[in-house]
């Protein structure tokens, strides 16, 4: 589904990514983790085509990630929700449906509105929404696309515990439909329960890339993802 090969990105003298390679299979949920400045958001933005790599190759469904065919097959949900001030919640969904050529979207929109407690907010303008509500609208817009690959950048920041629980259940449901999911997050305890595999970045390099099953076998069933994360990144609480 997604193949990243020898990906590099430099910002002037700063080398943000130093030749990372990984893949995500259909139906796989992968968490991309790391301390601030490790390259998580840069990686996701490169995959989404919002940044141009200094070197490397990104393929989505065997197509170059910048191609129209590839762009049709993924959805990007950014860390900072991109909500239009003068569109209502309903109009955001209609806009996305029109952009992706989705003919019948109302039933799915209503389903996600119910999951994220937006049903009574559907007539609200974007500028009238709280930060958490804007994040929920952004998530709903991404989910509406029925993409093959979902790129989530810090999706759980700013939303309430109920919404986090619903989102984790949605991740699992999407994986059962053979959708692929890449999630960047700092909330290690939340991601540990849903990921099939984790990538841990440090200073632009991948220091861990393994399935959760292998992770538990190597580190012991009682060792948390947080414990290993802090050890390999030399982070302290």
Image: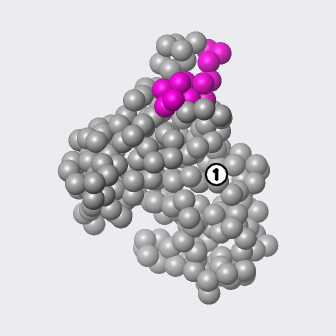
Asked if 117 appears above or below 220 in the picture, the reply is below
Q: Residue at x 37, y 34 (%)?
A: 206
For label 1, the SS is loop
Which residue is nearer to you in this view: 62 or 184?
Answer: 184
Q: Residue at x 43, y 76 (%)?
A: 99
Location of the C terminus (image quadrant): top right
Q: Relative to 2, is 77 on the left or the right?
A: right
Q: In the image, which residues are magenta?
A: 221-234
Q: Quadrant of residue 168?
A: top right
Q: Relative to 20, is 83 on the left or the right?
A: right
Q: Relative to 101, is 81 on the left or the right?
A: right
Q: Quadrant of residue 169?
A: top right
Q: Position of residue 214 (x, y in %)?
A: 47, 18
Residue 25 is at least partly visible in this image: no
- Residue at image mark 1: 156
Q: Residue at x 65, y 79 (%)?
A: 126
Q: Residue at x 54, y 71 (%)?
A: 82
């Amino acid at each position: 589904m997604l193949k990243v090969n020898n990906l590099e990105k430099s910002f002037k003298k700063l080398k943000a990514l130093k030749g990372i390679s990984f893949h995500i299979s259909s139906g796989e949920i992968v968490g991309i983790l790391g301390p601030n400045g490790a390259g998580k958001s840069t990686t996701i933005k490169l995959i989404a085509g919002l940044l141009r790599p200094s070197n490397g190759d990104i393929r989505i469904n065997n197509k170059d990630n910048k191609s129209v065919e590839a762009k049709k097959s993924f959805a990007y949900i950014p860390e900072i929700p991109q909500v239009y001030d003068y569109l209502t919640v309903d109009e955001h969904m209609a806009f996305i449906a029109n952009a992706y050529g989705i003919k019948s979207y109302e039933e799915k929109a209503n389903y996600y509105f119910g999951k994220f407690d937006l049903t009574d907010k559907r007539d609200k303008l974007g500028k009238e929404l709280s930060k958490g509500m804007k994040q929920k609208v952004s998530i709903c817009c991404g989910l509406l696309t029925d993409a093959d690959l979902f790129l989530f950048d810090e999706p759980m920041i700013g939303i309430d515990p109920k919404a986090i629980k619903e989102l984790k259940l949605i991740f699992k449901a999407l994986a059962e439909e053979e959708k692929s999911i890449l999630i960047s997050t700092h909330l290690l305890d939340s991601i540990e329960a849903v990921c099939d595999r984790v990538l841990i970045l440090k200073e632009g390099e991948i220091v861990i890339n393994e399935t959760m099953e292998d992770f538990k076998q190597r580190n012991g069933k009682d060792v948390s993802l947080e414990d290993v994360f802090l050890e390999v990144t030399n982070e302290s609480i």
